[in-house]
Amino acid sequence: MATVVELPRLSDTMEEGVVAKWRVAVGDKVKRGQVIAEIETDKATMEFESFDSGTVLVLVAEEGETLPLGAAIAVLGKPGEDPSEALAAAGASAGQAGASEAKAESAAPEPESKPAQAEAPATEAKAEAPAPRDEPVSIDPDERRIPASPVARRLAREHDLELSAIEGSGPHGRVIKADVEKAAASGTAKKAAGGATAGSYSGEVDGWGRPYVSRPDESMRLSQMRKTIAKRMTAAKQDAPHYYLTVDVDMGEAATFRASYNRAIEAHGRKISFNDLIVKATARALRAFPAVNVSWNGGQPVRRGDVHVGVAVAVDDGLVVPVIRFADQKSLEAISAESREFAKRARDKQLRPEEMSGGTFSVSNLGMFGIESFSAVINPGEPGILAVGAIEARPVVVDGELVIRQRMKMTISADHRVTDGAVAARWLGLVKRYLENPLEMLTDPG
């Protein structure tokens, strides 16, 4: 019997996923271990390797479709084998099977006339198709009764098309992705103008007599990463009582040290950044002051034996936090190399889930954006996060004289369940001392 390929769990916090891209097509021969799809998880877009060998009979899931864990996404078997039995045995819904048939039909020559099933009443078609998973609440109720795949509905909204005016080629007239793309290319099925659309206006004018132009709201796709960020950050703020402490650091010595250090290693094609120094100072302070390296777990504080520092990296659709393990024991060059590699692979969406878990503390640096100071949200499972601002030339009083110094603000967001203000203040003071005396944090801590 044919084998159903199910959506796997690709990260420890994954609850659903999106088939971002298929790497195979119906009829392709697949070997065990071959990459067949790219799956968007809550943390990254990852390559999915097949656990079995065979010929691709159907691709159940469409690209861009959100599915729960364990949902059927494809069927492998022998050429010409009927996938229906395997889908039924796996508990796949009739709607999923219909979607797979629709995909198979879309690859075949288009029939001259619409199948008789397409004339079935909307209520009957509704029973055959699953409820869309990720529809915005603003969808016209009339369009909800039209059988269509989630991807087809999204494309129709993006192209401003009436679903009711698109002829569906799927079972029972179900509108699929190919139908919407065909309608968009032909220019048919455009929605009639009405209400406040782009270019319309209320009659009010500005100071130059020009009408105010009204532009419509746009329903945006919620990526798995953004959905996870929303869920985890909301939980973090609700569960962990945050408190904040800010300190101003003189980065003059750090700047001098960095320049000298980079001159010494530039012949090897390497260099360190200010953020590498900050990560090193953070890690050394956590090792020297373990009272802060304590997380809340299962209703009680747990002192972490190791120091693993997460470094926040901004990507196109959100934020990821790869973890530098044993950061307190690594050299500046090792931290620098690892940080650069993580940042590159994060932006290429190639980080593995295990590289983004297990942190005991995090650092978030927005200094490159000119941010003077900010407060970050603690990553769930960690005791705190250090928010780092820009290094700026500012006037300060030193020994009674006004001088210009390179200054930087750092703010710790700490979990009040595991530390109090005085403890976090002493730790933050130690980080400040290391940055103002960088050679001190490079000595053997013993």
Image (cartoon, rainbow, N blue to C red):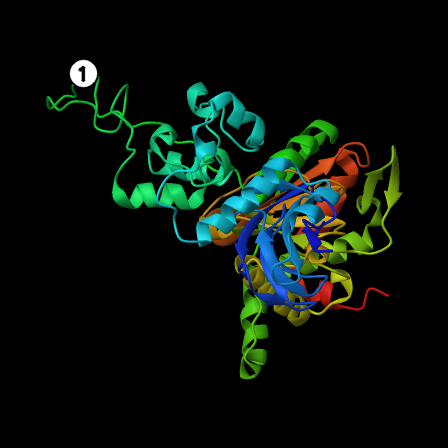
Task: Please state, as top left, top right, bottom left or bottom right, where the N terminus lies in the image.
Answer: bottom right
Q: Nearer the viewer, residue 287 or 31?
A: 31
Q: Nearer the viewer, residue 378 or 426?
A: 378
Q: Is residue 160 left or right of residue 71?
A: left
Q: Position of residue 121 (x, y in %)?
A: 47, 22
**Residue under the point 36% across and 40% down:** 113
**Residue under the point 71% across and 70% down:** 331
**Please, is residue 127 above or below residue 21 in the view?**
above
Label 1 belongs to which residue? 204
**Residue under the point 60% across and 59% down:** 80
Q: Position of residue 172 (x, y in %)?
A: 49, 34
Q: Is residue 113 left or right of residue 265?
A: left
**Please, is residue 293 above or below residue 35 in the view?**
above
Q: Is residue 22 left or right of residue 334?
A: left
**Which image quadrant for residue 53?**
bottom right
Q: Which residue appears farthest toward the bottom when viewing the image?
A: 267
Q: Position of residue 355 (x, y in %)?
A: 70, 58
Q: Secondary structure at mark 1?
A: loop
Task: Please state, as top left, top right, bottom left or bottom right, where the C terminus lies in the image.
Answer: bottom right
Q: Is residue 166 left or right of residue 203?
A: right
Q: Nearer the viewer, residue 94 or 200?
A: 94
Instruction: Answer few, some or many: residues within 10 Å of disc 1's Cα (few below 14, many 20 plus, some between 14 and 19).
Output: few
Q: Which residue appears farthest toward the top when viewing the image?
A: 203
* Observer able to see residue 108: yes
Residue kind at label 1, given as amino acid type = Glu
